[in-house]
Amino acid sequence: MRIWDLHCHLTGLPGLTPEERATHLLLYADRVGIERLCVYMGLRFLQNPTPEQLIQQNNEVLRALAAFPDRLFGFVYLSAEHIETSLAELERCVAHGPMVGVKLWVAGRCNNPSLDPLIVRAAELKALVFQHTWIKTGGNYPGESTPDDLVALAQRFPSVPLICGHTGGNWRLGLRAIQHQPNLYADLAGSDPTAGITETAVAALGPDRVLYGSDAPGRSFATQLAKVHGADIPESIKQKIFHTNLHRLLTPILTAKGIKT
């Protein structure tokens, strides 16, 4: 099967530079047959980066992309706390650079309309938007979105495809939250490889709204691939989850940029 990984990072890999870390990431990906990988954020996790740190994080991903343009897709890291800087980074990294998506993490909850200018511009550029979501038993980080927060954003932009990162971690609650919002897609990455996660996602959302991701290197490729390989679903649906669905979502911006896959 063709496999594209929606959700990867440079943090936690061996190496002192983006190029060294991307080399190791691809070494591991090659062992399990992953063709292309989407990379977000830089050499360390920053929940609420300053404007200068935001730019640095994106510069580090740009270096990884330059080293492996035929294997990596980059998503620009934006922050709801720094809208003007984030809009400028969209222009630099997507409109005038090689990145193809947007990564939103913890700094501000996505149900806040202050985020809307970023979504508007991302949609104009055809950039795919990925929003981290989580449901923590002990309470979320300040500014950390839940799937319900993302539903509120999706309702404001019903024609814009949005990815529910981690499907909220607690995937049963996450799938229930996003089920009836057709422009929301489930990211399988990051939760434990519990039996039934993929089957439940397909039953709730249909086979076209479920995407494979690993959250590597924080999670192993093997355990995350097993969620799909081991699922009791037809092989044709596994191929959609591993590749076809993400390829379809990225096709508008890949075509606009002349990127052949």
Image (cartoon, helix red, strand yellow):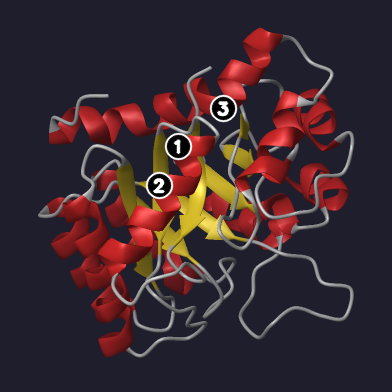
Residue located beneath label 1 in the image: 30
Residue located beneath label 3 in the image: 242
List x then y, in percent, for residue 118.
Answer: 35, 63
Give the residue at x 75% y 37%: 179
Give the residue at x 65% y 68%: 145
List x then y, in percent, for residue 184.
Answer: 60, 41
Marking on residue 66: none
Residue 222 sits in which quadrant? Answer: top right
The answer to the question of whether label 1 and label 2 lie on touching residues, with beta carbons closer than 8 A, is yes
Q: Is residue 210 above or below residue 145?
A: above
Q: Which amino acid, by three-letter code, is at mark 2?
A: Leu
Q: CA distance from mark 2 to mark 3?
A: 17 Å
Q: CA distance from mark 1 to mark 2?
A: 6 Å
The answer to the question of whether label 2 and label 3 lie on touching residues, with beta carbons closer than 8 A, is no
Residue neighbourhood size for the residue with mark 3, other residues' Cα within 10 Å, grouped as few (<14), some (14–19), many (≥20): many
Q: Which amino acid, by three-letter code, is at mark 1?
A: Asp
